[in-house]
């Protein structure tokens, strides 16, 4: 697990941590009906160029681990924005907001992808060439891939 702090964060937040992201959130590999293995998804770079709270100057997260990434920092540092940006990159039709601008680079199995989103424009590339958006789990599944620190710490008595 790797902890990532958005640029400009000066101290560690004692509040909710957002942005826990799973190792694999990819579609089933082509092949048999047995369900087969899923290619591993690894987010490598996230550029938040413009989102609420970051209209003039965004921030970049580089060097994300292939496993779980915990985003932490003080209030207003960009934790929730980071989680929303990841959702928007994977599910732009459901989660991306007009006026926002994002860039992401990720690996899906052995394929290297980039995506650039700005207003209504979506540019997807696989290995540096234009491509259709890859298939990710449906919109209903998107909420499974983000949780706050309070969720795993909650204990029912």
Image (spheres, rainbow, N blue to C red):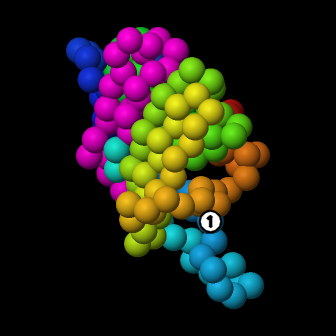
Residue drawn at x 27%, y 23% as measured from the top left = 7
Picture coordinates of residue 151 (x, y %)? 59, 33
Picture coordinates of residue 95 (x, y %)? 65, 34
Residue 150 located within the stretch drawn in magenta = no
In this rendering, does residue 148 appear at all? no
Residue drawn at x 44%, y 13% as measured from the top left = 55
Residue drawn at x 63%, y 71% as measured from the top left = 28
- Near-viewer residue (134 or 1): 134
Task: Work out whether 108 lies above or below 114.
Answer: below
- Near-viewer residue (69 or 109): 109
> What segment carries the magenta color?
46-71
In this rendering, does residue 11 appear at all? yes
Q: Which image quarter: residue 15?
A: top left
Picture coordinates of residue 106 (x, y %)? 41, 54
Task: Work out whether 104 lies above or below 131.
Answer: above
Q: Is residue 97 left or right of residue 21?
A: right
Residue drawn at x 26%, y 46% as measured from the top left = 63
Residue 69 located within the stretch drawn in magenta = yes
Picture coordinates of residue 23 (x, y %)? 46, 57
Task: Work out whether 149 lies above or below 127.
Answer: above
**Residue with the mark numbered 1:** 27
Q: Residues within 10 Å of mark 1 (few under 14, many from 20)?
A: some
């Amino acid at each position: 697990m790797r902890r990532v702090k958005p640029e400009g964060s000066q101290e560690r937040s004692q509040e909710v941590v957002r942005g826990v992201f799973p190792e694999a959130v990819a579609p089933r590999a082509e092949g048999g009906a047995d369900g087969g293995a899923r290619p591993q998804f690894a987010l490598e770079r996230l550029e938040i160029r413009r989102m609420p709270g970051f209209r003039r100057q965004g921030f970049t997260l580089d060097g994300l681990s292939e496993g779980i990434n915990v985003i932490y920092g003080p209030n207003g540092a960009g934790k929730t924005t980071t989680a929303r940006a990841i959702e928007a990159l994977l599910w732009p039709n459901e989660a991306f907001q007009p006026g926002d601008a994002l860039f992401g680079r990720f690996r899906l199995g052995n394929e290297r992808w980039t995506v650039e989103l700005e207003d209504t424009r979506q540019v997807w590339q696989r290995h540096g060439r234009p491509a259709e958006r890859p298939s990710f789990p449906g919109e209903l599944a998107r909420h499974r891939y983000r949780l706050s620190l309070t969720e795993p710490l909650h204990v029912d008595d």
